[in-house]
Image: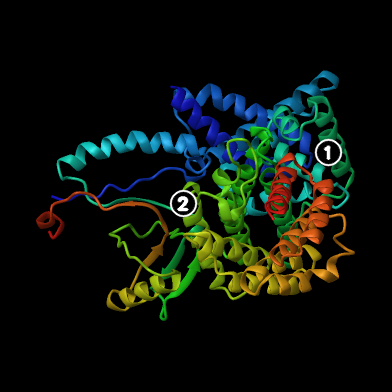
Amino acid sequence: MLYALLCYNSEEVVFSWTKEQDDAVMEKLHHVHEKMAVKNKLGPSLRLVPTTAATTLRKSSDPPLVIDGPFAETKEQLLGFYVVDCQDLDEALGFARELAVANPGGAYEIRPIRFFQPGTLPEEIAAG
Amino acid sequence: MSNDLAWIDAALSSARPQAIGALLRYFRDLDTAEEAFQEACLRALKTWPQKGPPRDPAAWLIMVGRNAALDGVRKTSRQTELPPEETISDVDDVEAPMAERLDGAQYRDDILRLMFICCHPDLPATQQIALALRIVSGLSVKQIARAFLVSEAAMEQRITRAKGRIAKAEVPFEAPGPIERAERLAAVAAMAYLVFNEGYTAGADATEDRAQLAGEAIRLGRLLLRLFQAEPEIMGLLALMLLQQARAPARFDADGAAVLLEDQDRGRWDRRMIAEGLGLIDKAMRHNRPGPYQVQAAIAALHDRAARFEDTDWTQIEALYASLEIMTPSPVVTLNRAVAASRSRGAEDALTLIEPLAGALDGYFYFHGARGAFLLQLGRDGEARQAFDRAIALANTAAEAAHIRSQIDRLTAQAKAG
């Protein structure tokens, strides 16, 4: 079974860490990651840029509405996510719009990624 | 446990602007609001480690701070005369539904007001910065004093004087209209950038406290953007600060001498800050409402995007400076444009661009430094040396002087070799 672990914390607190504090936490996390990675059990993991850099595509309206800021509703839940490599926000929004046509309702929150590692899952597991 | 305390400390400082902003609205007096917040923090340090932090630390601090200050008011008045019983119970009745009313509807204006009173036009820039660092960021007087290389007593006096001035000024407590809100936001953004520059422009010999100001300004920028999520200029401001600060680890060598952009080890630039800054400027540009912060951020982004100095898109940078010249005309902007032009079009064009500035910028270190560099590129060594001599006389920091001196040394070495 593949699991996703979603990380929550106060970004005001986390982003007031000094670089040294942040590096220290990343270093500790790295040791935990490694234990899973050597067993080929670690999939992609990433850290997002703060929500101030977020853009939300509300797909409940037609055409979908682009809003600055993070997804703030509590009536909807996080159901999945994509990682895409785009030239800029416009390209990412273009992809989100296409997804919205295929699957209307809800929203996509688009967040730049500041740290990404692809992981070590063997191909057959990664393929599902 | 120490982890807990570190978390509480961070939670208290990030709740600070909202909590003091709300307490200021309630008590309409800065000192009372600050004392109430202090008291609430002391109680938080006592109760949070045992009971765990509340779900909404800011709301908790506002509630507790408000009650503590009201208790204080009651105690003081009891020493003189007892207030009528019904007044006290009235106060209690008002307090009860307080938590529900903290719905965030007002806190945006609370924080903006708190920051705005620090930008009072009567206050000189240094006082604005000191006040904002004390009140909004919560730095201690000692920390601020060290950052500005003055004694603690002198800084205390400076802050007290600034507070006295704003106490006499009319602080607008009613919710601002859209135009007024935009004006306040612009003033506050400018103040945040002042704080940033205070830290960023300091040399390598500056204290750690001073360098830390850049980080404080970035925090202020994030705070503003959370309050005004759709303002492209606020996105631009935060992006600008991040994209500049990202280069900080490479700006000085081991001896503390300034390292020019072209000589910086780009591997030491902070990629995380760059990623965030690029994300923000990208988002801002979609609004098609350009402004000075966005343009400056776009310039910083072009530098940060270049893998090597030779890859810098100088043509684009010059075009951006040209649009900045129209938005905020100033000889310094033109000088920067000329530096970009010297790379994209050559030193001859650059020199032509700056000739008209000779009067306005005669007392400006960078003008003579840049002019010397252009002249040197054109092989006009004698004039270059004169310009460099003038620059050294005007240098603000040891690093600036050292940089120019190295160019003069190069000239001298060439002269000898020739």
Q: Position of residue A105 (x, y in %)?
A: 34, 71
Q: Where is mark 1, residue-wise?
A: B163
* Residue that extends furthest to the bottom in the rendered view of this protein: A63
In-front residue for pair B209/B100:
B209
Q: Chain of mark 1?
A: B
Q: CA distance from mark 2 to mark 1?
A: 39 Å
Q: Which disc is residue B271 wearing?
A: 2
Left or right of residue B101: residue B112:
right
**Residue B146, placed above or below residue B381:** above
* Residue that extends furthest to the left in the rendered view of this protein: A124
User: Residue B152, located in which quarter of the rendered image?
Assistant: top right
Q: Position of residue A97 (x, y in %)?
A: 37, 76
**Residue B58, placed above or below residue B298:** above
Which image quarter is the C terminus of chain B in?
bottom right
Q: How many marks?
A: 2
User: Residue A8, located in which quarter of the rendered image?
Assistant: top left
